[in-house]
Image (cartoon, rainbow, N blue to C red):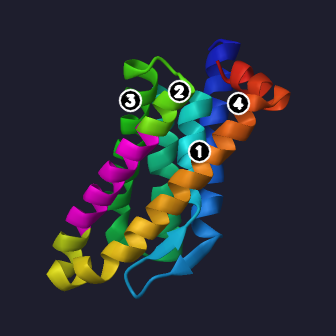
Amino acid sequence: MNISKIKSITLAGLMAAVIFVFTFTFKVPIGPLGYAHLGDAFIIVSVWLLGGKKAWGPAALGAGLADFAAGYTMWILPTVIVKALFAFTIFIVAEIIFKSKYYGYIIGVIIGAAVHIAGYSVAWLIIGGKAGLISAILPLVMQTTVGAVLGTVIISVLGASKQGKALKQMAK
């Protein structure tokens, strides 16, 4: 195995750990079926840092493990699917359609947030029925919005700093 592949695997594992920590540690319960957290912001950072082809795995793994550790086992599969789609959507828009331009990330995050909300809305409908969806939609939109704004701010700051540019270069 070459050093580039080892570095790539290591950074993916690190991002999965960061996503787990910010999902599991910084959470606010939103009823018996879930919680709001800051992990989504670091999914966005993961896409920016690793590139979308490599970020969907850490997004799914970190968030899925957080649901497992928190005891929300019925949410593991929906979380893994929705977080992978969230990261993959940002990747498609930002890196393929807009060729990694900053405004591409903003548009990607907006579209990814819509996919995130839609995906969890379907999951809520299946798991909690119409009443569950109705009670969850506002907290879901708020959590997604906070994560999207914070993630966009973080990649803005990192993208403008020498350390962030060096970190992104190292991740290639």
Q: Which residue is mark 4?
A: 159
Q: Which residue reaches farthest front? A: 103
- Residue drawn at point x = 30 percent, y = 83 percent: 135
Which residues, given as a range, are shown in magenta?
A: 108-123
Q: Earlier in the sequence, mark 2 or mark 4?
A: 2
Q: Residue 136: percent from the left, percent from the top?
A: 33, 77
Seen from the viewer's position, the closer of residues 50 and 80 is 50
In the picture, residue 118 is in which quadrant?
Answer: bottom left
Front position among marks 2 and 3: 3
Element carrying mark 1:
helix
Type of residue at label 2? Answer: Gly
Q: Is residue 88 left or right of residue 12?
A: left
- Residue drawn at point x = 37 percent, y = 28 percent: 92
Q: Which residue reaches farthest top? A: 2
Seen from the viewer's position, the closer of residues 72 and 163 is 163
Real-space Cα separation, disc 2 to disc 4, in angstroms = 14 Å
Real-space Cα separation, disc 2 to disc 1, in angstroms = 15 Å
Q: Which mark identifies residue 93?
A: 3
Q: Earlier in the sequence, mark 3 or mark 1?
A: 3
- Residue drawn at point x = 41 percent, y = 45 percent: 110
Q: Which residue is mark 2?
A: 51
In the picture, residue 88 is in which quadrant?
Answer: top left
Real-space Cα separation, disc 1 to disc 4, in angstroms = 10 Å
Q: Earlier in the sequence, mark 2 or mark 3?
A: 2
Q: Which residue is mark 1?
A: 152
- Quadrant location, the N terminus: top right
